[in-house]
Image (cartoon, grey):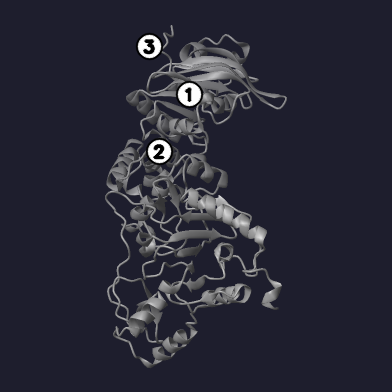
Amino acid sequence: MTGPGAKGGPLLRASGITKFYGDRVGCRDIGFELWPGEVLAIVGESGSGKTTLLNCLATRVVPTAGVIEYRMRDGRMRDLHALSDAERRLLMRTDWGFVHQNPIDGLRMTVSAGGNVGERLMAVGERHYGHIRETATDWLGRVEIAADRVDDDPRSFSGGMRQRLQIARNLVTGPRLVFMDEPTGGLDVSVQARLLDLLRGLVADLGLSAIVVTHDLAVARLLSHRMLVMKGGEVIEEGLTDQVLDDPQAAYTQLLVSSILQV
Amino acid sequence: MSAGAYNFAYLDEQTKRMIRRAILKAIAIPGYQVPFASREMPMPYGWGTGGVQVTAAIIGPDDVLKVIDQGSDDTTNAVSIRGFFVKTSGVATTTRTDAATVIQTRHRIPETPLAAGQILVYQVPIPEPLRFLEPRETETRTMHALEEYGLMHVKLYEDIARHGHIATTYAYPVKVAGRYVMDPSPTPKFDNPKMHRSPALQLFGAGREKRIYAIPPHTDVVSLDFEDHPFSVQEFDAPCALCGAEGVFLDEVIVDDAGGRMFVCSDSDHCEERRAAGHEGTLAGAPAWSGAAAAAATEDAS
């Protein structure tokens, strides 16, 4: 199903991803394919290796073993960990986004909202202040931040606004793949709901692929097409989101699903 | 303390060789910050220990040294560093820009154009232009290596967003020879155009941060800007009150306790030469200033 060089091939292919921290297992022997426009959720409890896997995929951590290939814009599959530093960093600030759980990790807190969104544009060579500001204001509008906040720095923003700003900052260069680490963590439920709504709209409009790490099955249900369930560093179940959540096969997945609080 | 107790120009010969190697590497890679084993000097960090080490490494018995501090030859920093080299090397000193072969400077480039064969040595407090945007040294080095300078423009963007124009007036970032972004030390941006294709060699020494960098003669030095907010230098409303010079960098001087002020050349040598040549500003000949001019003139020992 993966014709090499074919336009319809997967965007990212991981095989045998293993990460040890000394003797301890981070994640072990994980493989999957991510297709263009697909949103994949990685779920599991704390310590199950979700974030380790995400960091390996996003080249923030070097895996102990395994290969991660990514289809570059020219259509060729490249081994991510064999890219040069320059290529990898260019990829990270143009073709990828990374939304951190805590927006402080993903934003420049002392730089205005406009500067935060414009940073990637300037990094790829945009040198016209008017254009940068216009694009930044446009993106603030798309993530529902009022245009008159463009010169305020994120320290004056609420948690939900910071998270939306972080999303705008990542999407401004039109990435094809976005990594999200607990994007709704730490937000209250009504803000979560609006953020999820926004994310779902953006992902659909832009045709993004995304890999979302979350311990919140509701987030996975709303955002993702497919999911991996992790436990103890290994994938114990995978499949279409609705299928896994409605008819869990593994005992642990059944436990997870039955643990969802019903109000 | 007798001067005989010191090696020529204070530093021992091995140290000078080490610094000269760093300088040669810096010249070979314009704008690149070369680490060097900065020595303890008999003055505090922040007083020009980097510039003094560079000067000590390149100065010879036949050189003529000029030292300026904020453009002036007669402020504390300039007088004490000049005294230091007189004591430890016995070289001739001057206040005249065109008579000097080595000029050590804190925060100005002389108004008189520099000529081939002259060397301008800058005292640099913080050599890393990206420092206040990215605190990690490992990260800034990678950014220099990969030529990732988008962040520098974020700073300029912030200036325009907050002030409506690029409000950075000193330590204004430049790109050297189309490659490295460099901090020109806290010189006013007024002096940035003088660095561009200067016939003189420009050396930068940061003692505390242990870095040396350089601009070889005739090298392109371009100030960063936006297409719709181009780089421009400061402009002054009135000419120098003493010598009437226009198009030079002026200092504001408070002259009484009733809000009176005057604007005079920051480059004291330039101002004196102009007055000696008969140029007069609006306040020239005022009694408070004739004494100072005479004192400065007698110090001209070249």
Residue B289 percent coordinates (x, y): 40, 88
* Left or right placement of residue B4 versus residue B229 in this view: right
Task: Determine which residue is flagged by label 2.
Answer: A169
Q: Amino acid at mark 2?
A: Arg
- Measuring 64% from the left and 66% from the top, which residue is drawn there? B41
The answer to whether dots 2 and 3 both sit on one chain is yes
Q: Chain of mark 2?
A: A
- As measured in the structure, the alpha-carbon distance from the residue carrying label 3 to the one carrying label 1 is 22 Å
Element on which disc 3 rests: loop
- Measuring 42% from the left and 18% from the top, which residue is drawn there? A76
Q: Which of pointers 2 and 1 lies earlier in the amino acid sequence?
A: 2
Q: Can I make out residue B133 in this image?
A: no
Q: From the viewer's perspective, is residue B230 above or below residue B147?
A: below
Q: Amino acid at mark 3?
A: Ala
Query: Badge 1: how crowded within 10 Å, few (<14), some, or many (20+)?
Result: many
Asked which quadrant contains residue B209, the reply is bottom right
Q: Can I make out residue B254 in this image?
A: yes
Image marks 3 and 1: residues in contact by CB distance under 8 Å: no
Q: Chain of mark 3?
A: A
Query: Badge 3: how crowded within 10 Å, few (<14), some, or many (20+)?
Result: few
Q: Nearer the viewer, mark 3 or mark 1?
A: 3
- Residue placed farthest to the right in the image? A23
- As measured in the structure, the alpha-carbon distance from the residue carrying label 2 to the one carrying label 3 is 31 Å
* Left or right placement of residue B227 versus residue B12 in this view: left
Q: Which of pointers 2 and 3 lies earlier in the amino acid sequence?
A: 3
Task: Determine which residue is flagged by label 1.
Answer: A211
Q: Quadrant of the N terminus of chain B?
A: bottom right
Q: From the viewer's perspective, is residue B187 above or below residue B75?
A: above
Residue A219 percent coordinates (x, y): 48, 25
- As measured in the structure, the alpha-carbon distance from the residue carrying label 2 to the one carrying label 1 is 17 Å
Residue A6 tag number: 3
Element on which disc 1 rests: strand
